[in-house]
Image (spheres, rainbow, N blue to C red):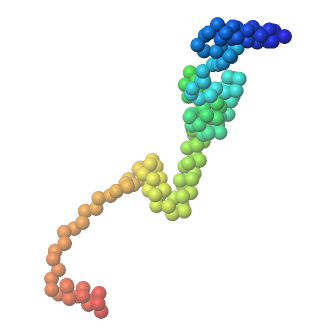
Amino acid sequence: MDDTVENQTINQTTNQTTAEGGNTPLANISASPVAPKKRGRPRALNGQVTQKDVINAINQTGGMIVESCNMAGISICDFYNKFRYNPKVEEALKQARRRGFEQVTDVLIQRALDGDMKAISLYLKYNPEAKAQNWVENQTLTLREEKPLTAEEKADLAKQLFG
């Protein structure tokens, strides 16, 4: 019932103001002011993101912070301000990144075993065991100096090639 009394008061005020010769009618003014639209990443529902929500998001994304924040519904700034230096969150990040590294390594090794030359090269380039065995990506070979062929050597070579 209070709402109807307020509406009547606003309507009476607008009619009086326009009747008195105001330049703008007050009928367009609403009873409650409209809040400006918020910018940036929307906050999580009810604004409550728990440590457990963040750890679940970290585990699902393999420790990628930006994707974890998107999944949990918080901004990156909120993550760093509220959760990053929490020991449980730090441990979850380490474990998720370790699992992600192991998965990528498994795929790389499988591709190398399947004969993918890029995977073989990458594996050998960064594998400590390969470095210990002096494997290098580019190796410089020193060739012996060659003398020009003699007439007899040219004839023998021609016989070999053309029969």
Q: Is residue 60 visible?
A: yes
- 121 relative to 65 in the view: left or right: left
Q: Quadrant of residue 142?
A: bottom left
Foreground: 73 or 93?
73
Q: Residue at x 73, y 9 (%)?
A: 12
**Residue at x 37%, y 55% (from the top left corner):** 137
Quadrant for residue 68, please give it.
Answer: top right
Up-down relation of residue 104 to residue 159 (above or below): above
Q: Quadrant of residue 89?
A: top right
Residue 83 sits above or below residue 92 on the image: above
Q: Residue at x 71, y 23 (%)?
A: 46
Q: Image height check: is 91 above or below 7?
A: below
Q: Is residue 87 visible?
A: no
Relative height, residue 56 to residue 83 (above, below) = below
Residue 17 horizontal/vertical position (percent):
65, 8
Asked if residue 126 lies left or right of residue 84, the reply is left
Q: Position of residue 66 (x, y in %)?
A: 56, 34
